[in-house]
Image: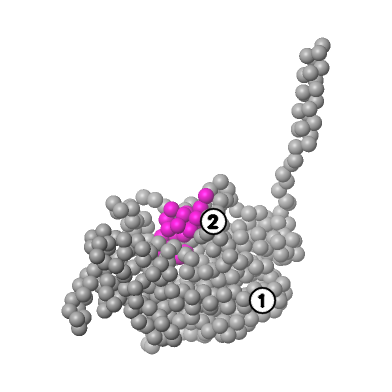
Amino acid sequence: MKHLKHYIYIIAGLVWLSACKPSIETPKPSKGSADFSRYIALGNSLTAGYADGGLYLAGQMVSYPSIIGKQMQSVGGGVFNQPLFDPSQANGSGYLQLTGFNADGTPITAPITSNLAITGIQPIPGFGNVTLYAKYTGDIENYGVPGIKLLHITYAPYGNLNGFYERMLPGAEGTHATTYLNFVTSKPFTFFSNWLGNNDALSYATSGGAGDVLTDKATFAGLYNLLIGTLTANGAKGVVATVPDVTSVPYFNTVTVGAVLGAVQKVNPQVQALYINALVSGTTYAPRPATAKDLIVLTFPTSKIGVPISTPYGNLPYGLTPYTPIDNQYVLDANEVALTQDYVQSYNATIKSIAASKGLALFDAYTFLNNVKLYGIAEDGINMNSNYISGGIFSLDGIHLTPRGYAIVANEFIKAINAKYGSSIPLTDVSSYSGIKFP
């Protein structure tokens, strides 16, 4: 009898514990105070789904706006159309694929050049050659245009200068006069996301400060104010994102000064430094030894180091003397890094201020991606970070994202939307999207 009472107490205790066990309930999908019936996305290559150095169908299909649009359908969202490449031209502009690794662990990539959507090259006087792509004529909700800056949104001839934008427009190349801002607002919409502004800093940075300029801060502020004012003029709500710290991506943090110098010293221990042509101030440059604060771009051909270069002082090894410094285009030096970051901080102050004044949701991509670089991220049981290839977030070009990276970004946008508008758009399952495809 004593044992029976003991078992009864145990059973009763288990029943009590079971009754007290907390339940986890997923919020019922709700649109909150927003209307998602026609959601449009504005932005550049990240918005378009660009990856691995190109825009192609498989990347378009997992763009972050398409993921957001899919998740919105459970809260009244409508069809989200994208200017997709035809399956017969699925490789779009062409892109890179990983084919293997060298003995030292460095990756080997090869370009995909079949089934492209390239239809020709159009010379534009005073500008250069523009690559043209197969036209898209259907409905559009994803207005992501690779290469576009905020600076371009009111420039009427821009459709003649960017083939990715040109393919969305009716009419022949060379005849376009529709501004991007007018194009994206030509049809009524109820909700928008905006991630324009990245290229206003990124294009300068990826050129090593040599092939482009940073958009003037006041010009950026004026255009951003115009853009958001236009998007919200008829009562539409939306979400905007800040400009990331463009110097934090793998494109600038994979080929390092220390790694290149170390490889040289294995062959010639007497070499003490790499030399770069660095910004002093204004437009003045001078050669100096490189430091860890100088960022070498991912595409730098390291085979150039040490190759004899003809100089007034005889043949000297490339990159290893102040008379043969590494070309500007391959290095964003410390002063250029500081300049870029200063402009990005200004751009982001503008974005945050205008978003707050209009009551918009905000995804702080600058803080989020810097935190990913510092600490990594774990979602849906997967650990990821900002390392090139192994990190799982950035694609083979070291700037744009993998499908998994785009899913992470989509979720961050959704979190910002839900927090601002009281909606409960469900998050996507990050684990169902792939990282880098290995051979």
Res 416 quadrant in image: bottom right
Which range is magenta? 383-400
* Vertical order, 354 against 300 (above or below): below
Q: Is residue 139 visible?
A: no
* Label 1 vs 2, first from the N-terminus: 1
Image quadrant occupied by the N terminus: top right
Q: Which one is in front, 284 or 395?
A: 284
Identified at 44% across, 86% down, the residue is 282
- State the separation of the CA atoms marked 1 and 2: 28 Å
Identified at 58% across, 65% down, the residue is 367
Q: Which one is in front, 395 or 116?
A: 395
Measuring from the top left, give residue 222's x and y in whole percent. Answer: 60, 84
Q: Is residue 171 part of the magenta span, yes or no? A: no
Q: Which residue is mark 2?
A: 375
Horizontal relation, residue 351 to residue 11: left or right: left
Q: Residue furthest bottom?
A: 126
Nearer mark to the viewer, of 1 and 2: 2
* Vertical order, 178 against 257 (above or below): below
Mostly what secondary structure, the magenta segment? loop
Q: Which residue is mark 1?
A: 353
Residue type at the position of mark 1: Ser
